[in-house]
Image (cartoon, rainbow, N blue to C red):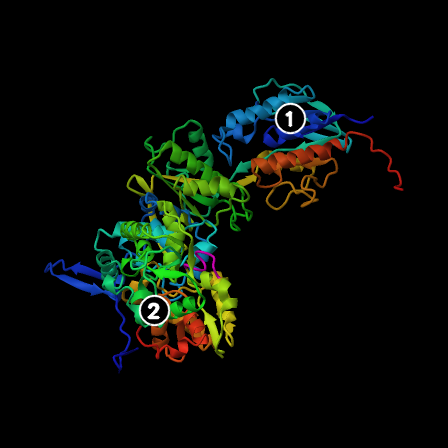
């Protein structure tokens, strides 16, 4: 007796795409989400536009959500978390419980039988108070993160938190919490250069008289992001890119003085800003960290789930029948996330059928 | 370097000046160079899009702000090799608030185009610089020596300030008849557009006479405009005087409209460039060739009189080679000359080093000299001499005077600088009688 079900853990873009893919092969997907709604970080953090093309995030994500909820082969359990995984590949038992803080009424543990599991528990933003530089995130109201800017952009207003006025000069500081041995996050978070450029374009469109600066170590708008975000930001929206990171933020009157070195000019720089946006990187979400331990799948030194077959099998974990996708595996943009989700879905449904006995080839 | 037979030590001219007023006496003290650099702020306090916005608003100035700082341009910039300049550096300076109109770098670019060849973002300084220079013409920013050339061009119709009626004087001693259209207005195959330096400069006239003998020997049906010819003025355009260029173009095309001809042939790659790329934008399209393109297909018909046992290296003119893609015609002619061994310099063809004469550089040697360790022509002569060549062959009228001067100032007096057509003429034996040819 083989299961016809895959349990997908996490209702963000990766989990939604995995569930949709499983249902598309004619199998059942049970999607577990600890929040009371689907959509994951783009919805929770109220993303404004999707990177790279800037389409409004909400309708795009809603479309993905609808494709899952409308499918009779999918079942969504909101406000639910996984507490145990038992059994064998092809015949797992997943134990579920109402998530703490969920609005749903508490009931006893439930179980779901399934043949395979896909982990899609995503990432969390780096906490800028851990940065070794003196950015004064909690000291200055006008020092914010990309996520807070994204919320303002989704409401079509960019204002200085200190006085409610539109900022004239805005800068992004790249690589906050990434590429940093002292912090322990030696990896590049992949998306922040593109997201900063996308947000810079949105600011320039919203506040045409504003001046927007991006201070960077290297611009890493890989692939098509180069010509889809970076070049238009510079050439059409006149965003000013300056090579050299800001090392400290100091108060100066009611503005902020950002200091660093202009590396290509070989000179110190001290520039006044109204709003400083920290391009914080990605770290494993709490869900990713907790679930990895609960399910017994190996994590790398940064806490992301390790893809033991990488690079050619980027979704298998060390536990057979358990797969991971998206930013649970490491920094990933939406394109990477849905691609690896589809890969994980395909791997997972392979555990739902008896395998045909191999016949000797002629 | 020697001057008028005397050894003159090099003089370092510091261009930067600052006046500092005493807070006690109010008296102003001039602080030159090294001292006033100590007062320059070291800390960058602002960046902004405003400098780019002003330049982008100029037709041709759009691409400066596209620079993403890779630095490929600086490595191949001929000016940076002898000074401190380069498109990437200009981009950063403008971003950090430098007014390009008031910056010496504005006049150092020779529009050689080697930066554009390697630029991944297609930042086109050959369009940016002329556009910005045009806006600097109103102020006091134009170096006096260049301003003088603009005025001569406007007043006399040529950059050398010569009387137009002497345009065809070179032809008197060519040894062959040279037809002038005004005197003999029948239709002609090749209208030969002599341009300024072959018309008036003594070494240019040598080349013009050599061309006349070669063209005559090959039976080419050709004629010149003589006193009716005006400079095309492409280098004046690239130096910022687009208005002057347009006015000259009106005069030139009005004269050309009087005559019937199949093709225009010119020895000047700058005139060639303008007729090929600028005139069509203004509604005038001609079948235009550089003289090497006219002669190269005919080289099999040349009756050689003697061998020239010479090692020759060839300098690609920026506006024939890199800007307009003709590398082979000059080489085909050189290789056709019996006895000539062609030696290539390390920088050749599309990576050829610039002689320093383009984009107004021809008339900015004094100004540029204050910002460079040596002239571009001097550096190029060193490269030519390093090949072991006897002859540095050229095919741009700017280059014989430039390189001949540079050969003297660098101590390579034995390196002979001449135009390709002079070598052809010599091997056809016309050149042997160059000194002997009497006035016609």
Q: Position of residue B62 (x, y in %)?
A: 37, 45
As drawn, is A127 to the left or to the right of B270? right
Tag 1 subunit = A
As drawn, is B53 to the left or to the right of B140? right
> Chief secondary structure of the magenta span?
loop
Tag 2 subunit = B
Question: Where are the magenta residues, as a range?
Answer: B319-327
Location of the C terminus of chain A (image quadrant) = top right
Please check the rendered image and state whether residue A36 is part of the magenta-colored stretch, yes or no: no
Structural crowding at the residue carrying mark 1, measured as other residues with C-alpha within 10 Å and reported as few (<14), some (14–19) or many (≥20): many
Structural crowding at the residue carrying mark 2, measured as other residues with C-alpha within 10 Å and reported as few (<14), some (14–19) or many (≥20): many
Secondary structure beneath dot 1 equals strand
Q: Are marks 1 and 2 on the same chain?
A: no
Check the image and report above or below for B217 versus B92: below
Q: Position of residue B29 (x, y in %)?
A: 16, 63
Check the image and report above or below for A293 versus B193: above
**Residue, disc 2:** B204
Separation of residues labelled 1 and 2 (CA atoms) = 86 Å
Q: Quadrant of residue A99?
A: top right
Q: Nearer the viewer, residue A247 or B426?
A: B426
Q: Position of residue A315 (x, y in %)?
A: 68, 39
**Residue, disc 1:** A32
Q: Position of residue A177 (x, y in %)?
A: 50, 44
As drawn, is B363 to the left or to the right of B19? right
Q: Residue furthest top?
A: A105
């Amino acid at each position: 007796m083989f299961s016809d079900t895959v349990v997908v853990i996490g209702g963000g873009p990766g989990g939604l795409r995995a569930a949709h893919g499983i249902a598309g092969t004619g199998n059942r997907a049970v999607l577990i989400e600890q929040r009371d709604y689907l959509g994951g970080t783009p919805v929770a953090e109220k993303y404004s536009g999707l990177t790279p093309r800037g389409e409004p995030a909400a309708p795009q994500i809603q479309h993905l959500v609808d494709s899952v909820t409308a499918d009779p082969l999918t079942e969504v359990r909101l406000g639910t978390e996984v507490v145990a995984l038992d059994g064998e590949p092809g015949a797992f038992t997943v134990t579920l419980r109402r998530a703490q803080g969920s609005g749903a009424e508490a009931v006893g543990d439930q179980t779901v039988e399934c043949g395979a599991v896909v982990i899609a528990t995503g990432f969390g933003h780096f906490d800028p108070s851990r940065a070794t530089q003196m950015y004064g995130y909690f000291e200055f109201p006008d020092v914010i993160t990309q996520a807070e800017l994204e919320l303002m952009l989704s409401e079509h207003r960019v204002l200085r938190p200190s006085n409610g006025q539109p900022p004239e000069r805005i800068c992004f500081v790249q690589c906050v919490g990434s590429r940093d041995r002292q912090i322990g996050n030696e990896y590049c978070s992949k998306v922040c250069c593109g997201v900063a450029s996308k947000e810079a374009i949105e600011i320039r469109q919203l506040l045409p008289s504003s001046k927007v600066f991006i201070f960077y170590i290297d611009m890493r708008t890989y692939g098509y992001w180069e010509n889809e975000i970076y070049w238009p930001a510079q050439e059409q929206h006149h965003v000013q890119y300056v090579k050299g990171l800001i090392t400290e933020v100091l108060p100066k009157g009611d503005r902020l003085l950002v200091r660093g070195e202009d590396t290509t000019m070989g000179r110190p720089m001290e520039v006044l800003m109204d709003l400083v946006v920290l391009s914080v990187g990605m770290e494993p979400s709490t869900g990713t960290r907790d679930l990895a331990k609960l399910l017994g799948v190996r994590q790398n030194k940064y806490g992301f789930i390790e893809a033991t077959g990488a690079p050619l099998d980027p979704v298998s974990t060390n536990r057979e029948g358990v797969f991971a996708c998206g930013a649970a595996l490491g920094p990933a943009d939406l394109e990477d996330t849905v691609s690896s989700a589809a890969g994980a879905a395909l791997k997972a449904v392979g555990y739902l059928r008896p395998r045909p006995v191999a016949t000797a080839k002629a | 370097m020697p001057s008028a037979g005397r050894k003159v030590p090099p003089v370092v001219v510091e261009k930067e000046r600052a006046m500092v007023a005493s807070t006690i006496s109010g008296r102003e003290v001039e602080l030159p160079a090294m001292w006033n650099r100590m007062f320059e702020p070291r800390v960058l306090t602002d960046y902004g899009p405003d400098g780019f916005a002003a330049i982008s608003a100029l037709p041709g100035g759009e691409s400066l702000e596209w620079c993403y700082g890779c630095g490929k341009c600086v490595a191949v910039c001929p000016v940076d090799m002898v000074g401190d300049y380069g498109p990437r550096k200009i981009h950063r300076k403008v971003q950090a608030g430098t007014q390009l109109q008031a910056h010496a770098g504005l006049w150092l670019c020779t529009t050689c185009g080697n930066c554009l060849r390697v630029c991944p973002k297609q930042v086109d300084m050959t369009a940016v610089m002329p556009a910005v220079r045009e806006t600097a013409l109103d102020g006091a920013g134009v170096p006096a020596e260049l301003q003088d050339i603009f005025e001569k061009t406007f007043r006399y119709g040529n950059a050398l300030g010569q009387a137009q009626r002497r345009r065809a004087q070179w032809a008197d001693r060519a040894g062959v008849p040279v037809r002038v259209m005004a005197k003999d207005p029948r239709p002609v195959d090749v209208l030969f557009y002599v341009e300024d330096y072959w018309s008036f400069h003594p070494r240019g006239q040598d080349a013009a006479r050599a061309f006349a003998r070669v063209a005559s020997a090959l039976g080419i049906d050709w004629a010149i405009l003589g006193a009716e010819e005006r400079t095309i003025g492409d280098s004046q355009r690239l130096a910022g005087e687009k208005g002057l260029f347009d006015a000259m173009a009106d005069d030139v095309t009005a004269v050309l409209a009087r005559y019937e001809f199949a093709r225009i042939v010119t020895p000047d790659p700058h005139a060639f460039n303008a007729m090929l790329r600028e005139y069509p934008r203004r509604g005038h399209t001609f079948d235009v060739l550089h003289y090497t393109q006219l002669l190269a297909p005919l080289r099999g018909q040349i009756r050689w009189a003697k061998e020239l046992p010479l090692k020759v290296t060839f300098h690609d003119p920026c506006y024939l080679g890199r800007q307009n893609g003709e590398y082979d015609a000059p080489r085909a002619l050189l290789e056709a000359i019996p006895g000539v061994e062609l030696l290539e310099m390390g920088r050749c063809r599309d990576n050829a080093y610039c002689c320093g004469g383009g984009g107004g550089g021809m008339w900015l040697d004094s100004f540029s000299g204050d910002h460079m360790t040596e002239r571009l022509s001097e550096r190029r002569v060193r490269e030519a001499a390093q090949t072991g060549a006897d002859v540095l062959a050229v095919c741009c009228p700017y280059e014989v005077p430039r390189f001949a001067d540079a050969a003297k100032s660098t101590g390579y007096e034995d390196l002979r600088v001449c135009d390709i057509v002079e070598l052809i003429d010599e091997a056809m034996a016309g050149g042997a009688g160059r000194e002997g040819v009497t006035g016609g």
